[in-house]
Image (tube, grey):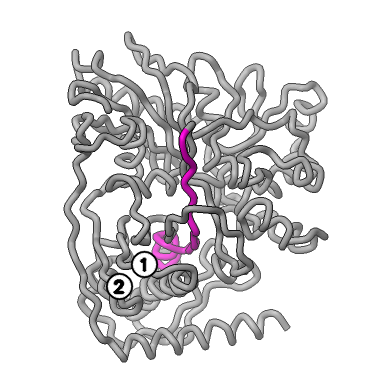
Amino acid sequence: METQSSLFLAIDQGGHASRALIFEGCGQVVAQQHAVISTFEPRAGWVEHDPEELVSQTLAAISGAVTQLGVDRFRLKAAGLATQRSSMLCWNSHTGAALTPVISWADRRTADWLAAFDFDRADVLRRTGLVPNPHFGASKMRWCLDHVPSVQAAAASGVLCMGPLASFLLHRLLRERPLLVDPSNGSRTLLMDVHRSQWDAYLLDLFGVASAYLPTCCSSRHTFGTLVIEDIQVPLTVCTGDQAAALFGDGWPRANTMYANAGTGAFIQRPVAALPIQQDNLLTSVVWSDETQTLCVREGTVNGGGRALTWLNEHEGRLANLSDFDNGATHPPFFLNSVGGLGSPFWRTDVAPRFSEESVDYPNKLAAVVESIVFLLVHNAERMEADAKTEQLLVGGGMASSTRFCQSLADLLQLTVLRSRQTEATAAGLAFLIAEGPADWRVAPSDVFTARENSALAARYRAWLTWIYAVLDRASR
């Protein structure tokens, strides 16, 4: 366990900004800086970032946070990196130059290709723990190989590297220019054997991605390389995915607890001791591995979290305000939340977002959108509860600022909901891992929502489910 005198740098590269937070060994933030990044949607269903901007803004955030320390910068003991898991790109392995934009986890350009692709989806699930869909990296890599001349040229010259955003940032940020991938990010390519955390030869052949193009697999804790910041050198010792790191925001995950993080996307996870691969359209993910242990979760995905509020803003010309959800809107319509694609357990990209009634006012549409996120999280949680009973749900992220959001989860699940006051769960969880899980880590207090009987909300949830399945059934005909 590290002493209080050590400082730890957590680098959180997210969908809207790059953040750098510096923590003491007890979990107290002593410096932080963020730098906004741009998102581009050049065509319908395409979502991209500029890789050079991501590098420069990440470096700017790091430099800004370290500068705040002054002479205390020499107390920096280690650093870690957490990124968007399913975002990927291609780059030149010799020069580090990006060959493609960063293709976001939210990108769906390969949906039609993947739907027509002839392969055994159940077998892929057993190997990877994932339900094949266009958000994961394999079909994006195949698209790059088929459509981007610079990628084809790099492959022919033996200098192509393709993989998760995390691997690209490690290569560009660290002095040693490593080509490495951790299990949390690597598994989101749809090319990794989740049981061994190694590339799967069958899947590589299936998607036509040569192993020579991919980073080398390693554990979540590894000697990745050296971050040079002005006059100091800091070893980067941890790399993982953003949602994986967020799971550790309040310390080591508890077996009796489900965890929801409702930000740009909304994710719900439950720790499991082993790797059950089940045909229930949920995901099984590795969130941590080191020399002593591997931690896995069952995971549900709601693509339209905060992104759904952005979608509403664009269509209504308004600025979404969660207080409107808390304070009113008692007669909302139903909302089919397929913003970014309808995630688990449905996994549909062929249906557009829609309301059951369009002729309602903005507050009720906003309520319908937020309520759909609640309902989707509950629907996924119910499937997890079929595996093993949990006692509570810890929820964080921007959506959790809504009291009605949290109380609705408690009432529908009939579980105690704890709302974490940890506002930077990904960075805090990453710092906890970098510091090797100190026993005196400061856990943020939680607001407690006790489950109540709410028959009206329960009936509405059941009616929403019936409507959703009916809409999807009609769309399939």
Question: Is 263 rendered above or below residue 209?
Answer: below
Front residue (pair 38, 455): 455
Secondary structure under tag 2 reads: loop
**Pointer 1: what residue?**
390
Task: Indicate left or right for 214 with 210 as reference.
Answer: left
Percent of width and height locating residue 174: 48, 19
The image quadrant that residue 23 belongs to is top left
Front residue (pair 280, 261): 280
Within 10 Å of the Cα at label 1, are there few (<14), some (14-19), or many (20+) other Cα atoms? some
For the residue marked with disc 2, what is the amino acid?
Answer: Leu
The N terminus: image quadrant = top left
Question: Residue 280: within the magenta?
Answer: no
Question: Which residue is painted at 20% across and 76% down in the image?
Answer: 327
The image quadrant that residue 366 belongs to is bottom left
Question: Residue 299: within the magenta?
Answer: yes
Task: Indicate left or right for 121 with 349 as reference.
Answer: right
The answer to whether one can see residue 44 in this image is no
**Pointer 2: what residue?**
415
The answer to whether one can see residue 69 in this image is yes
Question: Is 294 rendered above or below residue 313?
Answer: above
Residue stretch in magenta: 292-312
Secondary structure under tag 1 reads: loop
Q: Which label lies toward us, 2 or 1?
A: 1
Task: Indicate left or right for 188 with 437 as reference.
Answer: right
Within 10 Å of the Cα at label 2, are there few (<14), some (14-19), or many (20+) other Cα atoms? some
The answer to whether marks 2 and 1 mark residues whose Cβ atoms lie closer than 8 Å is yes
Residue projecting furthest to the top: 231
